[in-house]
Image (cartoon, rainbow, N blue to C red):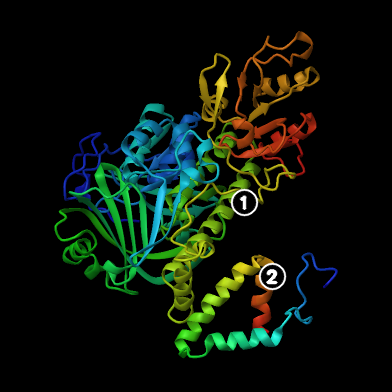
């Protein structure tokens, strides 16, 4: 963990501003240090859920738990969001992340501050090799959220922190730094330093959100798979007096960077991120010196372009993935989320976005267990689902890294051949790999997915009509379900009403009827009476649930992944699917 | 064809080229006059084009293994 000077603990002032300060980085918000009573009393605190690390994933998890009314404590080693002196990290947020942020109530702020984009262009030398427009691709248009918004990571972290202050339940303890961790007699105990002294705490569920240099890996002797390369990059966040297009531009071979790769991307405050690929094993201090950076920028944008350097940092990319997403620590259990679980090169925005998804996946499961609605077995699905996603993301980014930094010899020859062909032939463009943009990873080996579903996919935040014709979105229903699975019914015979009512009374599921408003059908054809009825006139919900033909029923998890679906409502099948979401084994023994 | 194979792959033992000698000659002719480096680059492009023409992942994987054997 980062060493902190004691002077940092000088009186901090609370401010909500993240104002862009020209040429010298950002002024980040500062929060008051939190000193728990245990510092004075010397008592050992005990928490059900303790999150270590207040970055993007830790804050997303804390905010998700707070929204579900679950108490948790989050320890953050400093008193701000972002990283001091390195305030610009992730910038590119996927539709899935934006949907999660919408569910948590901070999307409007992100939308107002960030920059939407959908067009990407790839160049080699002077030639454009290919371009894409995400708006024209796949199902992006089904969701209320756009394909991508670019925004500096610390904004999202700040929005999450402020949302947590509003919601309560979750307590963020600024200036609380974990200094030691021990397991004695099956009890895991943390030593935590604050500006006014140390205290100790234990927890049932510990979440490691400490990031890419997690101390838990050593403490718990975690096995992981690591791959290091010699590829070096220099990232420059800059502001110009000119305005490049709001597009993602990538050069595989940039004439203005000694024929190495360059990335150009816009974010909030009119700041551009320009990533320069450096010579293998280049000296980080030299390549990120201001003279070098200004020289490269002048070559790219012309000497007459005025440039403010906001932030510069050298990067050596590596990939790393834990072999298991959770580990026992005495009687407690430790979960790895975000960069503490896997580290990837930034190609395709697969770092932060998958960390947000880790948090969204874990939150409702922890909530269900802590609130007594599910057994601890449910938590095993966190590893099954998010490890599959982590491995996929590591593989996808490693493939991009290999394309962008081919080994000398035949790898370089094949890349030259690919670029040569891609300039003339459509087919070869699919081989050009400047990053495959992050998606909501599907789960194909999950113990809580119905066996007849080949995989569980994320159901997008599609729109529908309420009974009064107003427009609603799936996230409205998920928020209303408040951590319970959401059962959508397109058909509901009267004979099944008893079971549905029983589940509702037992607090196992929230049910919504998708159909005609009551009273519009002849009495004989009227379905069972439902208080909650919506209409799906364009079939968007059915499409997002993956129904190829007539929709019957769909069971959607609180993280909006599909758990089960069917044509005709079949009570035993739905009962098994519900039991799985409460931690029953795949065979469906009720808990 | 191997009847029990889950995917029907062309058996490499059975010749499939209508004019093997003609193809072989054309392949050599394509390389004539090229330096060693140019030939290697040409072959790389050719492999990528042929992969596209074949277009079946399982056949390509089998071919990669065959070339090693």
Q: Is residue A84 above or below residue A391?
A: above
Determine if residue B6 is in view: yes
Find the distance from the CA under tag 1 to the CA under tag 2.
Answer: 31 Å
Q: Residues within 10 Å of mark 1 (few under 14, many from 20)?
A: some
State the residue in front, A200 or A483: A483
Residue name at image x 49 percent, y 75 percent? A414
Chain identifier of the residue bearing label 2 in the image: B
Marks counted in the figure total 2
- Assign the N terminus of chain A to one quadrant of the image: bottom left
Residue A304 in percent (x, y) is at 14, 57
Q: Are marks 1 and 2 on the same chain?
A: no
State the residue in front, A109 or A435: A435
Disc 1: which residue: A384
Residue name at image x 41 percent, y 57 percent? A346
On the rendered structure, is A393 left or right of A92? right
On the rendered structure, is A398 left or right of A294? right
Residue name at image x 50 percent, y 80 percent? B42
- Residue A327 is tagged as none
Kindly check if marks 1 and 2 are in contact, taking CB atoms under 8 A apart as contact.
no
Disc 2: which residue: B59
Residue B37 in percent (x, y) is at 45, 86
- Assign the C terminus of chain A to one quadrant of the image: top right
Chain identifier of the residue bearing label 1 in the image: A
Residue A463 in percent (x, y) is at 53, 28
Residue A178 in percent (x, y) is at 37, 50
In this rendering, the label closer to the viewer, 1 or 2: 2
Determine if residue A38 is in view: no
Circle 1 — which element?
helix
Circle 2 — which element?
helix
Residue A150: quarter of image: top left
Residue name at image x 48 percent, y 34 percent? A65
Q: Residues within 10 Å of mark 2 (few under 14, many from 20)?
A: some
């Amino acid at each position: 963990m980062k060493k902190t000077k004691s002077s940092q603990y000088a009186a901090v002032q609370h401010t909500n501003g993240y104002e862009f300060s020209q040429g010298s980085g950002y002024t980040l918000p500062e929060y008051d240090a939190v000193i728990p009573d245990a510092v004075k009393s010397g008592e050992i605190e005990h928490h059900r859920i303790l999150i270590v690390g207040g970055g993007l994933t830790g804050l997303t998890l804390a905010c998700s738990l707070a929204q579900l009314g679950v108490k948790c404590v989050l320890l953050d080693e400093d008193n701000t969001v972002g990283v001091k002196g390195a305030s610009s990290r992730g910038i590119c947020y996927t539709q899935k992340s934006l949907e999660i942020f919408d569910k948590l109530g901070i999307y409007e702020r992100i939308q107002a501050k960030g920059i939407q984009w959908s067009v990407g262009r790839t160049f080699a030398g002077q030639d454009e090799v290919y371009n894409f427009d995400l708006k024209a691709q796949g199902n992006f248009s089904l969701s209320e959220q756009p394909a991508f918004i670019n925004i500096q990571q610390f904004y999202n972290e700040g929005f999450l922190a402020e949302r947590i202050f509003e919601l309560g339940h979750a307590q963020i303890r600024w200036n609380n730094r974990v200094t030691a961790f021990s397991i004695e007699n099956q009890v895991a105990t943390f030593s935590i330093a604050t500006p006014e002294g140390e205290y100790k705490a234990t927890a049932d569920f510990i979440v490691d959100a400490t990031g890419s240099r997690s101390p838990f890996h050593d403490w718990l002797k975690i096995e992981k798979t690591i791959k290091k390369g010699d590829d070096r990059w220099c990232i420059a966040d800059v502001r110009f007096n000119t305005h490049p297009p709001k597009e993602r531009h990538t050069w595989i071979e940039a004439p203005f960077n000694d024929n190495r790769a360059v990335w150009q991307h816009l974010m909030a405050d009119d700041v551009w991120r320009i990533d320069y690929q450096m010579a293998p094993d280049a000296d980080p201090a030299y390549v990120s010196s201001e003279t070098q950076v200004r020289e490269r920028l002048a070559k790219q944008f012309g000497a007459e372009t005025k440039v403010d350097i906001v932030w510069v940092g050298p990067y050596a990319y590596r990939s790393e993935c834990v072999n298991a997403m959770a580990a026992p620590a005495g009687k407690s259990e430790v979960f790895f989320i975000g960069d503490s679980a896997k580290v990837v090169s930034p190609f395709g925005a697969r770092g932060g976005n998958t960390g947000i998804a880790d948090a969204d996946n874990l939150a409702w499961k922890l909530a269900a267990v802590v609130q007594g609605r599910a057994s601890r077995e449910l938590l095993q699905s966190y590893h099954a689902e998010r490890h599959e996603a982590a491995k996929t993301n590591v593989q996808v980014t490693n493939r991009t890294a290999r394309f962008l930094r081919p080994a000398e010899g035949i790898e370089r020859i094949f890349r030259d051949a690919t670029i040569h062909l891609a300039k003339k032939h459509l087919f070869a463009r699919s081989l050009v790999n400047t990053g495959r943009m992050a998606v909501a990873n599907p789960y194909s080996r999950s113990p809580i997915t119905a066996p007849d579903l080949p995989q569980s996919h994320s159901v997008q935040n599609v729109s529908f009509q309420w009974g009064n014709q107003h427009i609603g979105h799936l996230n409205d229903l998920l928020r209303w379900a408040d951590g319970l699975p959401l059962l959508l019914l397109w058909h509901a015979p009267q004979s099944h009403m008893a079971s549905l009512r029983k589940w509702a009374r037992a607090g196992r599921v929230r049910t919504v009827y998708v159909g005609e408003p009551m009273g519009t059908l002849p009495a004989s054809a009227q379905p069972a009476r439902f208080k909650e009825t919506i209409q799906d006139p364009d079939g968007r919900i059915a499409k997002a649930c993956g129904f190829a033909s007539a929709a019957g029923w769909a069971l959607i998890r609180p993280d909006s992944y599909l758990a089960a679906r069917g044509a005709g409502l079949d009570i035993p099948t739905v009962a098994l699917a519900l039991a799985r979401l409460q931690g029953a084994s795949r065979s469906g023994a009720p808990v | 064809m191997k009847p029990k194979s889950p995917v029907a792959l062309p058996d490499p033992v059975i010749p499939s080229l209508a004019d093997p000698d003609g193809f072989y000659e054309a392949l050599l002719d394509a390389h004539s006059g090229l330096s060693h480096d140019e030939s290697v680059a040409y072959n790389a492009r050719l492999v990528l084009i042929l992969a596209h023409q074949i277009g079946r992942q399982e056949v390509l994987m089998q071919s990669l293994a065959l070339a090693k054997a």
